[in-house]
Image (spheres, rainbow, N blue to C red):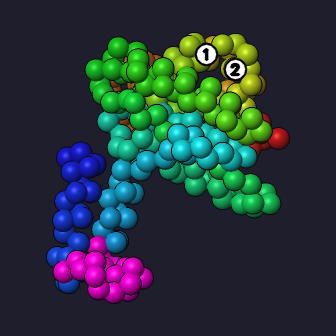
Amino acid sequence: MKLLNLVALSLSLLPAVSGAPLDTSGPSPLVFQRQNQPANQLLSYIFQLFPVNNDVEIGVCGDIVVIFARGTTEPGNVGSLVGPPLFGALRKRMGANGGQTLAVQGVDRYDASVTAYLQGGDASGSQQMADLVSKAMKQCPSSKIVMSGYSQGGQLVHNAARLLPASTMAAVSSVVIFGDPYSRFPVQGASPGKVRIFCHLGDDICVDGDIILLQHLTYFMDVDEAATYILANAK
């Protein structure tokens, strides 16, 4: 079921979950929030299942801006297996570094379909990722821009790099890819010293295969190392 359908369903269940009808002429918003705590928890859970980050699109900058492409069939626009754990690891370290800020933008013009993966990565998503990198650099000139992706999202990183001018890629702070189907190829325009690719031994996707094994589903274990790498390159 699509995200909007789930959200609509949840909103329709607000009175039922809270045990009280929705009356806009009644208590203050704070009282309503307290009365509907179970419903609010339900909505929070749904949005955790479908994580969406659109900081660049709404004009938010940070000390570091991560443009992230999720893996095949993952929900939201940043997925759930790698993206959110990576952002959490970054925020933890950045908070310890004097309260630095993080902005995150997911690639959402991207179906993340199996067919697109087999064709070398979604073309529309690849172009949008390139556009988002350019947009982030223009509206956040003092930010460090990071390109990152997981699985098919790694294909998008490679494809976007080929679409971008060499000068733009030279200005990218870090490129970090997890479970990269194109791990045997360099990221065009990026200095090797700015690129980190995580590929687990036995991960068939990392050798451009099409079999999902356990090794491909455990890259959340690498997010601490990835966050350390990103911050070191951002200095």
Q: Work out whether residue 186 or residue 171 is closer to the camera in this orientation and state it.
A: 171
Magenta span has 33?
Answer: yes
Residue carrying label 1: 164
Q: Residue at x 68, y 31 (%)?
A: 137
Q: Is residue 24 above or below residue 121?
A: below
Magenta-highlighted residues:
21-39
Asked whether, in this view, residue 215 is left or right of residue 57, the answer is: left
**Is any atom of residue 150 visible in this view?**
no
Q: Residue at x 54, y 19 (%)?
A: 160
Q: Work out whether residue 193 or residue 69 is closer to the camera in this orientation and state it.
A: 69
Amino acid residing under circle 2: Thr
Residue 168 shows which numbered tag? 2
Q: Position of residue 214 (x, y in %)?
A: 38, 39
Q: Work out whether residue 51 or residue 131 is closer to the camera in this orientation and state it.
A: 131
Q: Work out whether residue 34 or residue 51 is closer to the camera in this orientation and state it.
A: 34
Q: Residue at x 32, y 64 (%)?
A: 43
